[in-house]
Image (spheres, rainbow, N blue to C red):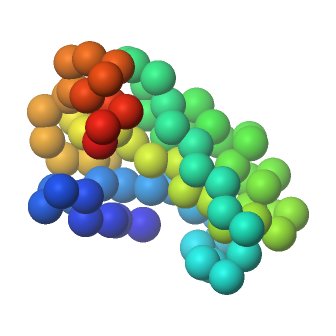
Amino acid sequence: MILDVQGKAAYAYTGGKPFDASLPSTVFIHGAEHDHSVWALQTRYFAHHGFGVLAVDLPGHCRSAGPALRTVAAMADW
């Protein structure tokens, strides 16, 4: 799923199910030098057990546009 975050394309994996905003939602955010795939097992479990799931790629990682953010503070602000 592609989202618009601050005018740039940001990818979010949904755990193999379409995202449903009416469900309780869980957001997974990877650490530096990773991407959404580090959450593969967890996101699939939650998505198939009644949760809406978004596992985002931070800017400059895997499918998200933009330069990689250089600090933890910048990642938190994003």
Q: Position of residue 20 (x, y in %)?
A: 63, 79
The answer, for residue 62, to whether it is visible in the render is no
The C terminus appears in which quarter of the rendering? Answer: top left
The answer, for residue 63, to whether it is visible in the render is yes
Judge whether 49 appears above or below 77 on screen: below
Taking the image as shown, residue 14 lies to the left or right of residue 47, namely left
Image quadrant of residue 47? bottom right
- Image point (37%, 33%), residue name: 76
Q: Position of residue 74 (x, y in %)?
A: 25, 28
Judge whether 15 appears above or below 58 on screen: below
- Image point (30%, 54%), residue name: 10
- Image point (42%, 66%), residue name: 1
Taking the image as shown, residue 47 lies to the left or right of residue 9, namely right
Judge whether 53 appears above or below 27 on screen: below
Which of the two residues, 23 or 19, is positioned nearer the viewer here?
Answer: 23
**In this figure, what is the number of numbered marks?**
0
